[in-house]
């Protein structure tokens, strides 16, 4: 039998006993109410009849005082009190309303008539006294008959009150007895109700609840400590305890699932924190080499079960070249054309051995007819292909699937960092290059000059500097316009690019002036190189807007370290030599005469 059935029967019996107890308590309360009403009625009747005796005595006293004294004040007082008395019917009606019975009212009515008769004698005595016959008035009011009438009225009132007392005492006794009886019955019913309740408690909680609950409590305590391997109690009965056991079993299973999810969440948080730290490091990289080092350090931690490679795109060869590897990938080639990867072709990740059938990449060496479980993640920037992240399974490890989302995040972060780095390099290059001539500008001169002198000092080789100035450049601007002057400067810049060696460095120094650093050349070789440049400039035929701008010439000053000047005065010495060339008639090469000059 289910606990619900047992408790329902017990509940029904308890309700019936409770109703019986309530009914007896109501009856006891009703008896007490009757007792209270009887006591109140007795008090009201005592009060109503006591006024009759008092009124008779008061009027007798006032009448006798007037008979003795003849004072008008006593007469007025008597008449005032006599006027306040009501008729017999009115006074008996008030007593009837207070609860007097018909026989009691008849006896009281007779007493009141006696009182009225006595008032008649008082009126006769007062009238005699008013005529001056004091003796007659005193004889009436102090006669034995008058005294007997007063005593009879008092005795009648007392007898009436005794009858009222006896009747109300009997009613009170009856009400008290009934109240005690019903209260005792109520207590017995309440005792039975408590006994039934205790029996139910004993059976349910001791036999069917307490023992299983104690055992389940131990299980709950262990589950609260996340000990989901606890031995599970078996309760096959179909009742609340069995339902509780099933609920706790579900809680245990949910706890196991939750524990697994928490582990997965912690692992996911760890990987995301790792990706966040990797992204922060990549944002601080100044070169592709630094970025490659960060990828080589963090990528194996993001996907520890996978081997991988990081490829950079070489636009000149239109090929991918491996830049870093981890965990020894063996399936993908170190270099391949971009079209050999379907991921690069499609511009999105490519996994041929996943849940969907797809075409394998040509750069991945397949294992016979079995597709290699690999994934290619292209790194695409704003200006096209930047590189590729490649991953493959390591030996007998699990499939790539669980790590695929992290690999996508990794590729997005790496692609963004690589694109930002390329953009930064491009912006840096633009900042260091003169946009008109394509030569390095003066910002880059200081770094290049220090590097050249450092190498020359370490290798004990000379460094020469040539300062080049276009002759009469203002003439081109004034005669043909500034666009024509720009065309002349571009032509001179192109002539410099064609004339220098790979190790030489050409700069636009400012305006129409150019500077050429020639590491490894002494004074004689530098002068010869300057003569060749002067001749190339002189042979330029510059046209602008289909017009020939005329001959273009340049003056060049050459200085060499350590033959002619100190290292920190090399540019100043070349500039001084340029001034000598201009003073000498322009379109010529000049050098400092001695190191001391």
Image (cartoon, rainbow, N blue to C red):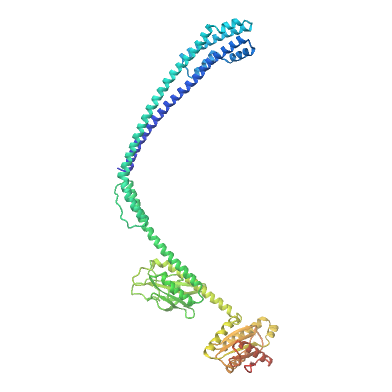
Residue 310 at x, y percent in the picture: 44, 75
Front residue of this view, candidates 217 and 394: 217
Does residue 262 lie above or below 370 as drawn?
above
| Residue 464, above or below 194 | below
Does residue 461 appear in the picture of this structure? yes
Q: Residue 180 location, x and y as percent?
A: 38, 27
Which residue does the image show at 43% across and 66% down from the upper left? 270
Q: Is residue 458 left or right of residue 535?
A: left
Is 64 rendered above or below residue 516? above
The image shows residue 581 at horizontal and vertical percentages of 66, 91
Q: Quadrant of the C terminus?
A: bottom right
Tally the marks. 0
Name the one closer to the observer, 133 or 552.
133
Percent x, y for residue 432?
58, 79
Q: Which residue is the extreme one toward the right?
A: 478
Is residue 412 visible to the viewer in this orientation of the structure? no
Does 456 sit above or below residue 50?
Answer: below
* Quadrant of the drawing holding the N terminus: top left
Residue shown at 31% from the left, 48% from the top: 212
- Location of residue 592 by image quarter: bottom right
Place residue 230 in its image quadrant.
bottom left
């Amino acid at each position: 039998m289910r606990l619900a059935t047992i408790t329902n029967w017990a509940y029904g019996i308890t309700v019936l006993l409770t109703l019986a107890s309530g009914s007896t308590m109501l009856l006891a309360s009703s008896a007490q109410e009757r007792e209270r009403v009887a006591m109140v009625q007795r008090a009201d009747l005592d009060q109503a009849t006591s006024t009759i005796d008092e009124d008779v005595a008061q009027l007798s006293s006032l009448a006798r005082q007037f008979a003795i004294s003849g004072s008008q004040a006593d007469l007025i007082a008597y008449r005032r009190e006599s006027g306040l008395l009501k008729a017999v019917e009115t006074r008996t009606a008030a007593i009837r309303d207070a609860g007097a019975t018909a026989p009691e009212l008849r006896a009281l009515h007779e007493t009141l008539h006696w009182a009225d008769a006595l008032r008649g004698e008082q009126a006769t005595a007062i009238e005699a006294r008013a005529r001056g016959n004091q003796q007659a008035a005193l004889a009436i009011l102090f006669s034995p008959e008058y005294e007997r009438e007063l005593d009879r009225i008092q005795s009648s009132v007392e007898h009436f009150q005794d009858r009222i007392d006896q009747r109300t005492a009997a009613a009170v006794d009856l009400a008290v007895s009934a109240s005690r009886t019903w209260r005792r019955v109520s207590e017995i019913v309440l005792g039975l109700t408590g006994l039934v309740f205790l029996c139910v408690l004993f059976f349910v909680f001791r036999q069917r609840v307490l023992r299983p609950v104690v055992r389940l409590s131990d299980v709950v305590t262990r589950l609260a400590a996340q000990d989901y391997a606890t031995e599970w109690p078996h309760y096959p009965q179909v009742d609340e305890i069995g339902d509780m056991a099933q609920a706790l079993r579900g809680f245990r299973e949910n706890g196991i699932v939750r524990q697994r999810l928490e582990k997965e969440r912690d692992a996911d948080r760890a990987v995301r924190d790792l990706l966040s730290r990797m992204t922060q490091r990549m944002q601080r990289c100044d070169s592709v080499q630094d970025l490659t080092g960060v990828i080589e350090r963090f990528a194996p931690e993001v996907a520890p079960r996978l081997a991988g490679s990081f490829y950079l795109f070489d636009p000149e060869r239109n090929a991918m070249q491996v830049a870093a590897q981890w965990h020894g990938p063996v399936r993908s080639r170190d270099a391949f054309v971009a079209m050999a990867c379907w991921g690069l072709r499609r511009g999105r990740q490519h996994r041929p051995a996943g849940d969907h059938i797809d075409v394998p990449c040509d750069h991945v060496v397949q294992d016979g007819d079995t597709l290699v479980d690999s994934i290619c993640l292209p790194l695409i920037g704003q200006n096209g292909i930047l590189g590729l992240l490649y991953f493959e399974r390591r030996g007998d490890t699990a499939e790539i699937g669980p790590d695929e989302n992290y690999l996508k995040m990794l590729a997005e972060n790496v692609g963004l960092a690589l694109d930002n780095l390329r953009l930064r390099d491009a912006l840096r290059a633009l900042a260091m290059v003169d946009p008109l001539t394509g030569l390095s500008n003066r910002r880059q001169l200081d770094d290049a000059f220090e590097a050249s002198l450092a190498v020359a000092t370490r290798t004990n080789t000379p460094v020469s500097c040539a300062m080049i100035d276009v002759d009469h450049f203002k003439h081109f601007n004034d005669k043909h316009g500034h666009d024509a002057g720009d065309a002349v400067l571009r032509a001179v810049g192109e002539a410099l690019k064609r004339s220098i060696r790979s190790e030489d460095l050409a700069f636009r120094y400012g305006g129409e002036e150019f500077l050429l650093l020639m590491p490894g050349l002494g004074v004689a070789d530098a002068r010869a190189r300057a003569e060749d440049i002067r001749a190339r400039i002189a042979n330029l035929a510059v046209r602008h807007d289909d017009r020939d701008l005329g001959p273009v010439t340049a003056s060049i000053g050459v200085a060499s370290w350590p033959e002619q000047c100190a290292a920190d005065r090399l540019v100043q010495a070349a500039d001084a030599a340029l001034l000598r060339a201009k003073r000498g008639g322009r379109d010529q090469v000049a050098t400092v005469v001695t190191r001391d000059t």
